Image: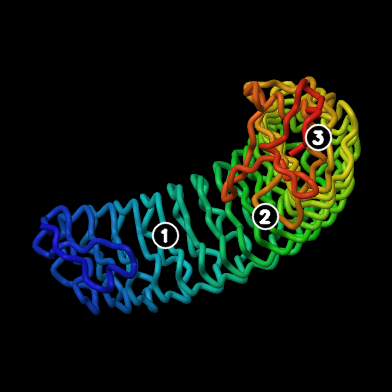
Amino acid sequence: MLVGVDAQSCRVGLMCWDRFFSSNRHFWRTCAGLSHVPHDIPAEAHSVFLGCNSITSVPSGVFSHLTLCKRLDMDHNQLSFVHKEAFKGMVSLEELHLYKNNISTLEPGTFADLRSLEALYLWGNQLSNIDAGLFQNLNNLVNLSLSQNSITTVEPGSFADLKSLEILYLWQNQLSSIDAGLFQNLNNLVELSLVQNRIPAVELGPFADLRSLEALYLSGNQLSTIDAGSFQNLNNLVNLFLSQNSMTTIEPGTFADLKSLELLYLWGNQLHSINVGMFNNLNKLLNLQLSQNWISTIEPGTFGELKSLEILYLWGNLISRIEAGMFRNLHKLEKLLLNENQISYIEDRAFDSLFSLEILDLAGNRLVTLNPDLLVNLPRSPLQLGLSEDGSSRQTNRWNCPSMCWLKHEEQQGTIRWWFAEGHTEHSPVCAAGGDWYQLQCDEPGEVSSQNYF
């Protein structure tokens, strides 16, 4: 029977269940005001729910009679002490939820009897150190969450027994290094998150054994350097997140082994230039985000090998010129964002090879006019074009609107419509000298009416 939700459960977003909902197979005592583990849990219980209480400790052997139990929830309590033999005898346990407690230490061997365990959730505690041996015998563990703790040290070999592990979350901790061998034996790991730690560099070795890895999250650290070869052997990596770090340069060949990569986030760093060789071998890359850096120079041919690329974000940089050849070979590119740069010049035919382009954002730059040859080879289905923003950008283009009657004609024909980013409103070109785009009168494409301009 479902009953009302009390104040505590409302805070944590949980639903509370009446204690009389319990059966021999499912034992419920969530949000029941418990201060200790109850003694009346039936031995036949397959799942035990003790979340959202005030339990402070888990004594030795308190669950030893639960040999059939597959799930134990003790999240959102006040646990500060877990005895080394607290889970002794729980040989059938598959899920253990200990998140959102006050646990600061766990002895090696605490989980040694849990040979059937597949998921262990320890996030949101106060752990500072992971000792070697803490996860011994957990050969079937698939999911381990250690996020939102205060972990500064993970001893070598801590994960060595986790041969079935597929997901490892260590985000929002205080790790300051990734040592070689830290992830040794994790041959089946698919997803690794180290977001929002204090890691200053990625050196050779830490990820060498992670041959099954598909997603690596390193955003929000203090990365200033990545050694070439740091990502060697990651042949199955699909998503790599390196945003919001402090990288100023990336050595050519850094990503050369990532032949399956589809998404690469490098936004929010301090990159000054993008050079040939930086994206070698990334033939499957679909999404490249380089926004909010300090990029002023893009060497022609830099993107030449990205023949599958569909999305390229370069907004919020210091680019002043777009030159022919800069986007050569990007035949599948659908979305190109160049807004909020310092672009004052675009070379004719600079976008010639963008045969699949659907969205081009040039708003928030220093442009005055557009030559009709600039967009001549772009598709019109229609082309979504961003030329001016709604006042939220640092600056905006002030267009010489009479010189762009060809664009007015395309708008009227429906081959071009105005693009606006999320959070902005649709905006036609902002004309210089207080002119109004919608009052611009053109006799023929490219010709201004002999009547007054506005």
For label 1, the SS is: strand
User: Is 49 situated above or below 383?
Assistant: below
Amino acid at pointer 3: Pro
Q: CA distance from mark 2 to mark 1?
A: 46 Å
Look at the image and tell me whether residue 231 can be seen.
no
Q: Position of residue 260 (x, y in %)?
A: 67, 32
Which of the numbered marks, if any, corresponds to residue 402? 3
Q: Position of residue 248 (x, y in %)?
A: 84, 56
Label 1 packing within 10 angstroms: few (<14), some (14-19), many (20+): some
Q: Which residue is mark 2?
A: 391
Q: Residue at x 56, y 60 (%)?
A: 170
For label 1, the residue is: 121
427 or 451: nearer the eye? 451
Q: Quadrant of residue 427?
A: top right
- Spatial CA span between label 3 and label 2: 22 Å
Residue 129 visible? The answer is: yes
Q: Quadrant of residue 84?
A: bottom left
